[in-house]
Image (cartoon, rainbow, N blue to C red):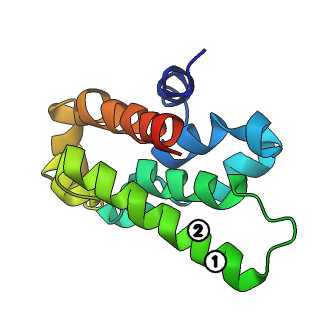
Amino acid sequence: MKKSVEAIENFKTMNCAQSVLLSYVSEIKLDRVTALKIASGFGGGMAMAETCGAVTGAYMVLGLKGPTEGKSIQEIKAEAKAGVRKFNELFRAKHGSLTCKKLLGVDISTAEGSAKANEKNLFDSVCKELVGSATDILENDF
């Protein structure tokens, strides 16, 4: 199964960050429960409608999947930053922003914004696509 399809399926019961990270657990050799815990606070733009959870989930994957053997901490950090920059460029080019508020057009960190997102079915119509897109970028460009 394509990881993007798996991530979208995950999104039925998990937040956006968890959905992306969980689609990579076997590849990055991380157990599911630990992955769920790590990504639990990143959904909904870190609960503040800031950086999209699908994006932060992708950052976690990039950091965990990079090879580290024989590399210094500085090299590992530099490679992770380069990967994040490349991911950001690709995601922003496709969606126009990395920020949950801008991607959804509402601030889901407020009761009013969350109600409007539910009313407009944004979690299903927009977030599901963002989860799939973030995972597609990881699959196809890294």
Look at 44% across and 33% down and name the residue there.
136
Look at 22% across and 35% down and name the residue there.
122
Question: Compared with residue 43, is residue 50 higher up or lower down, i.e. above or below?
Answer: below
- What secondary structure is found at the residue carrying circle 1? helix
Q: Is residue 64 left or right of residue 96?
A: right
- What is the total number of numbered labels drawn onto the structure image? 2
**Residue beneath label 2, please?**
80
Within 10 Å of disc 1 (Cα), the crowding (few <14, some 14-19, many 20+) is few
Residue 116 seen from this side: yes
Q: Is residue 136 left or right of residue 101?
A: right
Q: Residue furthest top?
A: 1
Q: Position of residue 128 (x, y in %)?
A: 36, 31
Q: Is residue 28 left or right of residue 45?
A: right
Where, quadrant-wise, is the N terminus in this rendering? top right
Residue placed most toward the observer, 30 or 113: 30
Residue placed most toward the observer, 70 or 107: 70
Residue placed most toward the observer, 7 or 65: 65
**Residue beneath label 1, please?**
77
Look at 61% across and 44% down and name the residue there.
21
Q: Position of residue 48 (x, y in %)?
A: 35, 66
Look at 60% across and 69% down and name the residue there.
79
- What secondary structure is found at the residue carrying circle 2? helix
Query: What's the mark number on residue 4?
Result: none
Q: Is residue 16 left or right of residue 126?
A: right
Quadrant of residue 66 within the rendered picture: bottom right
Q: Position of residue 84 (x, y in %)?
A: 47, 64
Question: Compared with residue 115, is residue 63 higher up or lower down, i.e. above or below?
Answer: below
Measure the C-alpha gap from mark 1 to mark 2.
5 Å
Which amino acid, by three-letter code, is at mark 2? Answer: Ala
Q: Are marks 1 and 2 in contact (CB under 8 Å)?
A: yes
Question: Compared with residue 31, is residue 10 higher up or lower down, i.e. above or below?
Answer: above
Which amino acid, by three-letter code, is at mark 1? Answer: Lys
